[in-house]
Image: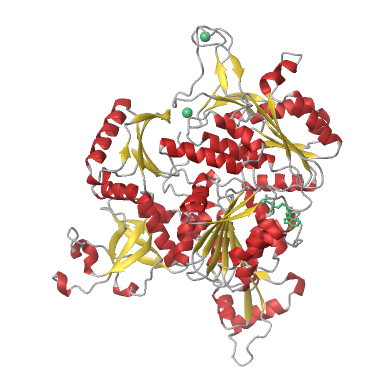
Amino acid sequence: MTASTDTTRYARIAVQRGFDRHPEGLVYSIPASLHSVGLGDHVTVPLGRGNASVDGVVVGFGGSELLGARLTASRIKPIACVDSTIDPIPAIVIRLAQWISSYYCAPIGVTMAGITPSAVRKGIGRKSHIAVDLAQAPPTTTRIHPKRQAVIDALAHRDPSTRPVDIDVLRAECDLATHAPILALIKSGHLEATHRSSVQARWRESIVEDARAWTPTIEQQSVIESVSGALREGFSQHLLFGVTGSGKTEVYLRLAEQVLMMGKSVLYLVPEISLTPQTGGRIIARLPKQRMAILHSGLTAAQRHEQWIAAAQPGSKIVIGARSAVFAPVADGELGLIIVDEEHDSSYKQDQAPRYHGRDVAIRRAQLSACPILLGSATPSLESWFNATTRGVSRLHQLTHRAPGLRTPRVEIVDFRREIVLHRDRRVHLIGPTLEVALRQAFAAGGQAIILLNRRGYANWIACPDQSCGWMMQCDHCEAGMVVHHDSSTGSKERFTRCHHCHAEQKVPTRCPRCAKAVTIFGLGTQRIEEELNRLFPDLASQGKFARVDSDSMSKASDFHDTLGRFARGDLRLMVGTQMIAKGLDFPNVQVVGVISADTALNLPDFRASERTFQLVSQVSGRCGRSAQDGRAIIQTFQPDAEPIVAAARQDFVGFATRELAARHRFGLPPIHRLARAIIRHENRSEAQRIAAHLRAQLVSLPEARDVVIREPVPCPIARISDRWRIQIEILAATPAQLQQLLAAARSQAIVVPGEVLAVDVDPVALL
Ligand code: ADP
Ligand code: ZN
Ligand code: ZN
């Protein structure tokens, strides 16, 4: 057969194993038996010499032109089968994945694999969540098969309070081999099916939420009106800069209601699992009848599956979730609004391939869906601020006051150098007298408190006391110090050390391996704060009124959810934790917020250190004063004059952002310029250096590199992780297009092949 008579149809398949040489997916032929295969369908294809069966998604179609010069028709394998039980991925989501694959330099297969949860691909928990009941108005004319009549009878004989009944239960009760008779009855209209959601049912019962719809303030009303004016006008981008407690959620909910009333759907993104229960609870309370889906990584496989199906079902709904919910299978043409709450939050950025930023992908999705997108924050990212105030690509809306009934928190900077000397004993004190007194007053008045320390574990330095020796315990596999942890699970208080980069564990040494002096353990961690709080407030501690909230103590999303529920009900008086508790949460009885050390973020070797510190201090301070009671935020620091801390205490975002943008401008940094980072990782240090030098030389030689700055390779701030040395090359361009052209050229010429050795991070948010 010659190419001109070849009428075979071909499909491009994003297979789950990543092959960067084929950024658009691998080509397979479509056998006649599968001619109805469609875009976004989940398929199984043979791969490699052994023809291993792998999952993939159809991302494109074509004729023999797909073969190009290198492929011959006879060597193309056919698609093996189509899994029609999984809802296809909507076309817009496929275009989104293609954009991610090219913009963030990630293979399409890896990108697509992150889009359909594995529970959905594997069919986990598929059937068990359908509940069935007798139809309100069943058809009267059709004759019913006896087997099916038995199902109807079984349901009719049930007590109405036990209906609807789970489809599996009904099947067992009627002694059926398959669900087919029940499904047939649903199809014929004799039975009604409802998708039951265990996730939503659970949130409904356990979140204590105020369902009141507030009368919007004049400020809120004006934001609602101006965004709602854009709801029918296709794509537009909006930034809502509203101080903490200004009632941004109320604005989101009112706009969401309008969109739902238009018969469209809303995608509502929140940065972390931690914020999903509270936001979910609020939305459920306000819109109890509204169809919704909740998508995040903390769900069980079966729950993810059930929620994914709920998102894919046609009809207006609200889909809430963390980063990956941006890929929700909401049908094309159905989205009416995307909301990105706490848009500045760095957890929107995925730290493994594909290294996409959920906010930026959401903007792209809104463009493709021709709907508005609303980004909101009390501390907007400089990227979004720059877009709204300088580049003019997004409209700025402001809420300058807290909602009625809320107080402005009093933020006090405490110079910790002075505080330590006030302590009489020689113990380690991480809570200074000012914070301690404030906590005592709050507890005495029946109030609650939140304490933030952005570091897990007990203490982060294990070292020789002798300065002339200078030994410090490091991980054997990383260029990083080990952190002491207490094993709280056993109650034995056993201590061990753990590396926060590769998770290796070791015993706590008692003597210095070089000079045999007894080691000292110092530094801070949430477990040490917990210990000190137990000592300071033994009564509350013994009543179980404290909770430590970090990724060690909250291994499951439900742990965190339960803890928030106990805090909301007042069973807990204090939460101490990492940034998990610093943002978004709205609890009216919080009278004191303490920051143990505002310096932890400030001293990171990252050009965003100031921005992060400003955000953290502002956000955590914003957790108090959410009622008529006074709120105090006490910020302990060794650098009380540091600009971001002072600006955050004064709640002066605009001043901070203006100065910081000017500095970024001077140094040619984002958001003024675009940054990408190539990271070379190799067990052998000199090999890593060699590869990096070679890569840079090749990049520099490309014509697309002319107006782009490609820095010399240097070791990453953490120079080795998990036995692999890490070298980085920073690439800076004046425009995103320049950066993209360079990367695309490097990729098509196989100069840049992301994989084990090379990682490419476009618009990185962390530079370690
Ligand atoms: P933000 O997200 O801006 O920090 P929230 O949306 O959490 O603020 O709102 C803070 C509190 O103010 C919430 O408890 C909310 O119910 C309340 N609130 C919001 N809008 C109003 C309003 N117009 N009148 C009274 N209270 C309001
Ligand atoms: Zn390590
Ligand atoms: Zn020593």
Q: Is residue 761 visible?
A: yes
Residue 206 picture quarter: bottom right
**Image quarter of the C terminus:** top left
Instruction: Name the residue: 62% across, 54% down.
Output: 398
Residue furthest bottom as drawn: 141
Picture coordinates of residue 175, whole percent (x, y): 61, 72
- In this view of the protein, which residue sits in the foreground, 32 or 498? 498
Report the number of numbered marks.
Answer: 0
**Image quarter of the N terminus:** bottom left
- In this view of the protein, which residue sits in the foreground, 67 or 401? 401
Instruction: Name the residue: 53% across, 11% down.
Output: 512
Residue 458 picture quarter: top right
**Within the displayed image, which quadrant is ligand 1 positioned in?**
bottom right
- Residue 656 in the image: above or below residue 523: below
Picture coordinates of residue 624, whole percent (x, y): 73, 42
| In this picture, residue 660 sits left or right of residue 543 | left
Picture coordinates of residue 183, whole percent (x, y): 56, 76
Instruction: Name the residue: 73% across, 48% down.
Output: 565
Instruction: Name the residue: 65% across, 62% down.
Output: 222
Picture coordinates of residue 491, whole percent (x, y): 70, 29
Residue furthest right as drawn: 445
- In this view of the protein, which residue sits in the foreground, 104 or 304? 104
